[in-house]
Amino acid sequence: MILFQFLKYFILYGASKVEVTLYKEEKQEEAAKVTVVRKMKVFVLFVAIAVAAWQCQGDDHGVNFQVFPLRMKSGLGGHYIPEISCQSWMLGVEAHNIIGFSSVPKDCVGYIGNYLVGDQYRSDSKTVCREAYFYVKTLNISSKDAWVFDIDETTLCNLPYYADHGFGAEPYNSTAFDEWVFRGVAPPLPESLKLYRKLVSLGIKIVFITGRPLSQLDVTASNLKKAGYYKWDKLITKDPSYNGKTAVTYKSNERRKIEEQGYNIIGNIGDQWSDILGTNVGGRTFKLPDPMYYIS
């Protein structure tokens, strides 16, 4: 114990050498005194490890530490827990690592549904929109500054439709979705509506660019007004000339046209990566959560 305390003292006070005086009684009458000075670099490292190990023992400190082996999977015995697996899948979607999927995994319908109708979806949306507003407040707004909004799952919410279609687990049905759109009853996404109102109050021009076709222009305009989006400078729907082209190509071209008309796009928000990728994306882009579908 005395030796251990000495070593601990040595580590704490950073000594690099220790002087040890050894006395050896000889059978002869005179005692010889030998001074040994040794460099302790390697030994210090060894002792440091020993001290650290001693300090981590639970019994001396009233704490028991347990070490669990790393597992590639979750749960007892290394089996997947669906909720954790689905959370990882959704993270992959939002990080744009999982792309091109046609439907939500069936095992994840419950998880995705609970996320969307629970508090977390709105909390995540609030975080995105709040950061967008904080960004805007750092700018000196001019009369031609514009903000681009997507529509579906950005300004208008189609959850009433998707709740009846497995929250994205069913493959996309254009006929059924068009019927929903023509009803014109989609509610607003609350956090997006708040952001919209703040931007309008600052004098920023609002531009909507949607993947909805030209045939849905009137019902979309009516739905936006019912939902609280009462004014805008432009509402752009997808012209038939873009059929067969990606959303990135379509929206990039339309944003370019807007800037050619003298607008300065300071921000751009959407639920799909294709809303905010490409060219002429604006000063900053903001991605809202949407694990239900993917548009390239």
Image (cartoon, helix red, strand yellow):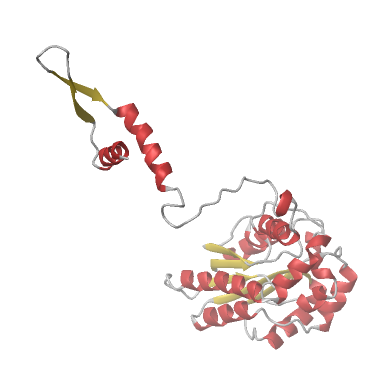
Image quadrant containing the C terminus: bottom right
Can residue 253 be seen? no
Residue farthest right in this picture: 175
Residue farthest top in this picture: 28
Residue for point 72% across, 83% down: 187
Q: Is residue 243 left or right of residue 89?
A: right
Can residue 73 be seen? yes
Q: Residue 125, percent across and down?
A: 61, 72
Residue for point 12% across, 17% down: 31
In the depicted structure, whether residue 188 falls above or below residue 209: below
Q: In which quarter of the view is residue 175 placed? A: bottom right
**Which of the pair 169/191 is nearer the observer?**
169
Q: How many marks?
A: 0
**Which of the pair 150/10 is nearer the observer?**
10
**Which of the pair 199/83 is nearer the observer?**
83
In the depicted structure, whether residue 270 falls above or below residue 233: above
Q: Residue 192, percent across and down?
A: 61, 77
Q: Residue 217, percent across and down?
A: 77, 77
**Which of the pair 8/33 is nearer the observer?**
33
Q: In which quarter of the view is residue 32 placed? A: top left
Q: Is residue 229 left or right of residue 18?
A: right
Image quadrant containing the N terminus: top left
Q: In which quarter of the view is residue 169 placed? A: bottom right
In the depicted structure, whether residue 116 falls above or below residue 171: below
Q: Residue 47, percent across and down?
A: 35, 35
